[in-house]
Image (cartoon, rainbow, N blue to C red):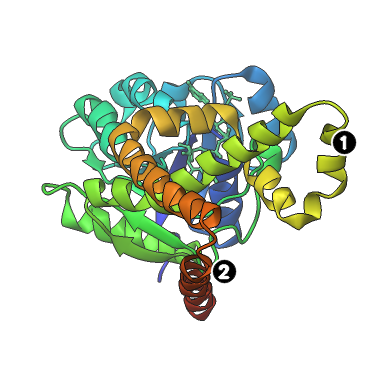
Amino acid sequence: MSGPLFNKIALIGIGLIGGSIALEARKRRLANKIVAATRKAETADLANKLKLVDHCGTDLAAAVEDADLVIVCTPVGACGAATKAIAPKLKPGCIVSDVGSVKQTVIADMLPHIPKGVHFVPAHPVAGTENSGPEAALLDLFQGRWCILTPLPDSDAAAVDKLETFWKALGSMVNRVAPADHDRILAITSHLPHLIAYTIVGTADDLGGHLNSEVLKYSAGGFRDFTRIAASDPTMWRDIFLNNREAVLEVIQRFQEDLFYLQRAIRWGEGDKLFDLFTRTRDIRRALIHLNQA
Ligand code: NAP
């Protein structure tokens, strides 16, 4: 390849995901210039202090001026307003993307603000940690992880290909999926597990009294892994549940039915039912290790 993939990349929001894109894109020389803009001045100051980008400010529209690639990296509930704010300064031919964990509502919120001649290609890197903010940015976050592109039927083919090349250059494997399918898949693989973690940690906390400290002391028995997930950013996860409402409600319903099945098996001493399920789930874990996604 001769020269970087893009001349200027602008990131709107510079937390875990925006910051990690910036670090990786710079390391791999994917742009001549990488800038960012965020809502709060203190977040911008921190991003500048950490040298995540060439410059980070708080004027979202100014940041996207002359950019060839703009990636909105805010919580999903803020994607629409951020796109509205940057729209007047988007250059014709520029690619606008996002990293939102929900696709249908984000597309519905962003699309109306995308000017004619600007290419909108929604995306979701399925990689992360429970940490947030500029200090959480990590090199290698996307290495070997999937990035799901959810192009629209009329998305510009060259723009979709270019964004795919970008994510592959960041170390990701890329797949293209319909937005509705994306939301249903992530409801079970990511959103329900987070909801369960939030619930378990809340339930344990409610035990109260002298048991409370015992719970923390013996947390290695499984609880500890849930506390890590339940430490994930409250704003981000509030937005995910409110925006993937239908798909999440559907999997909660199914989960409740399955939980009742187990509850009944335990009550009536039906060990074979428990054993069969636990055997099936162990095979799933082994398959995951085989796919290198553990
Ligand atoms: P984060 O670390 O909390 O960063 C969010 C960034 O967005 C911060 O710079 C924040 O800046 C900014 N922001 C928030 N509200 C804004 C607004 N109204 N206007 C402009 N900027 C705003 O979050 P993250 O983990 O990077 O997540 C960002 C997106 O990636 C979310 O949509 C999430 O669904 C998606 N995602 C997350 C993960 C994960 O594991 N964390 C994985 C894949 C995708 P201020 O401090 O200035 O508000």
Q: Is residue 210 left or right of residue 56?
A: right
Q: Is residue 273 left or right of residue 226?
A: left
From mark 2 to mark 1, how far is it between C-alphas? 31 Å
**Residue 69 quadrant:** top left
Q: Secondary structure at mark 1?
A: helix
Q: Is residue 124 visible?
A: no
Q: Which mark is residue 294?
A: 2
Q: Residue at x 58, y 29 (%)?
A: 234
Q: Residue at x 23, y 30 (%)?
A: 108
* Residue 263, percent from left and from top: 50, 49
Q: Is residue 5 left or right of residue 51?
A: left
* Residue 285, percent from left and from top: 53, 72
Most extreme residue toward the left is 154
Of callouts 2 and 1, the N-terminal one: 1
Say few, some or many: other residues with alpha carbon within 10 Å of mark 2 (under 14 / 14 to 19 / 20 or more): few
Q: Residue at x 64, y 44 (%)?
A: 130
Count of marks overlaid on the render: 2
Circle 1 sits on which residue?
213
Depth check: 281 or 129 in front? 281
Q: Residue at x 47, y 51 (%)?
A: 264
Badge 1 amino acid = Ser
* Residue 2, percent from left and from top: 41, 68
Most extreme residue toward the front is 268
* Residue 272, percent from left and from top: 49, 71
Badge 2 amino acid = Ala
